[in-house]
């Protein structure tokens, strides 16, 4: 994708960003009547947009070095020796 001929750059967002979007959406939908229709709709749209941007980031953003180290296997699995039956 491109905007005005320049490719779009996607930056990784933190996992807490996605958590806030999910929890905020749930709380907004539960207390929609308490906030009133204007604030309820505004908060719901805000958290839905946050959730969508988190989903786009998860699928399009390149992994950073910090993420790659966290995902890498640092130790080889130990061989489990089978006990011989006597």
Image: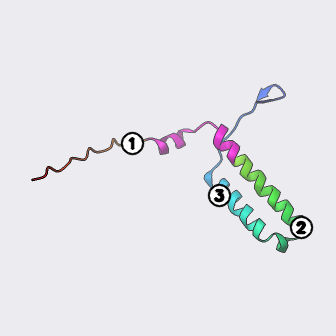
Q: Depth check: 33 or 1 in front?
A: 33
Left or right? Give the position of 12 relative to 76.
right
Q: CA distance from mark 2 to mark 3?
A: 24 Å
Of the two numbered discs 1 and 2 on the same chain, state the one appearing first in sequence. 2
What's the mark number on residue 19? 3
Query: Which segment is the magenta one?
Result: 55-72
Name the residue located 33 percent from the left edge and 41 percent from the top edge: 76
Q: Residue furthest bottom?
A: 34
Left or right? Give the position of 73 relative to 61.
left
Secondary structure beneath dot 3 equals helix
Of the two numbered discs 2 and 3 on the same chain, state the one appearing first in sequence. 3
Residue 62, magenta (yes or no): yes
Of the two numbered discs 3 and 1 on the same chain, state the one appearing first in sequence. 3
Q: Are marks 3 and 1 in contact (CB under 8 Å)?
A: no
In x, y percent, where is residue 71?
Answer: 48, 43
Quadrant of the drawing holding the N terminus? top right
Bin the neighbour count of mark 3 within 10 Å (Cα to Cα): few under 14, some 14-19, many 20 and up: some
Secondary structure beneath dot 1 equals loop
Name the residue located 86 percent from the left edge and 62 percent from the top edge: 41
Figure colour scheme: rainbow
In x, y percent, where is residue 36?
Answer: 88, 70
What's the mark number on residue 39? none
In x, y percent, where is residue 65?
Answer: 53, 38
Residue under numbered circle 2:
37
Q: Depth check: 62 or 22 in front?
A: 22
Q: Residue furthest top?
A: 5
Q: Residue furthest front?
A: 85
Residue under numbered circle 1:
74
Name the residue located 66 percent from the left edge and 37 percent from the top edge: 60
Left or right? Give the position of 69 relative to 15.
left
User: Looking at the picture, does residue 76 appear above or below residue 39?
Assistant: above
Nearer the viewer's eye, disc 2 or disc 3? 2
């Amino acid at each position: 994708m491109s905007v005005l001929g320049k490719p779009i750059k996607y930056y990784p967002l933190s996992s807490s960003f996605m958590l806030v979007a999910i929890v905020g959406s749930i709380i907004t939908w539960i207390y929609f009547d308490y906030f009133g229709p204007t604030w309820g709709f505004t908060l719901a749209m805000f958290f839905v947009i946050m959730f969508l941007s988190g989903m786009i980031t998860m699928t399009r953003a390149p992994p950073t070095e910090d993420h790659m180290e966290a995902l890498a296997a640092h130790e080889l699995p130990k061989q489990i020796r089978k006990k011989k039956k006597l």
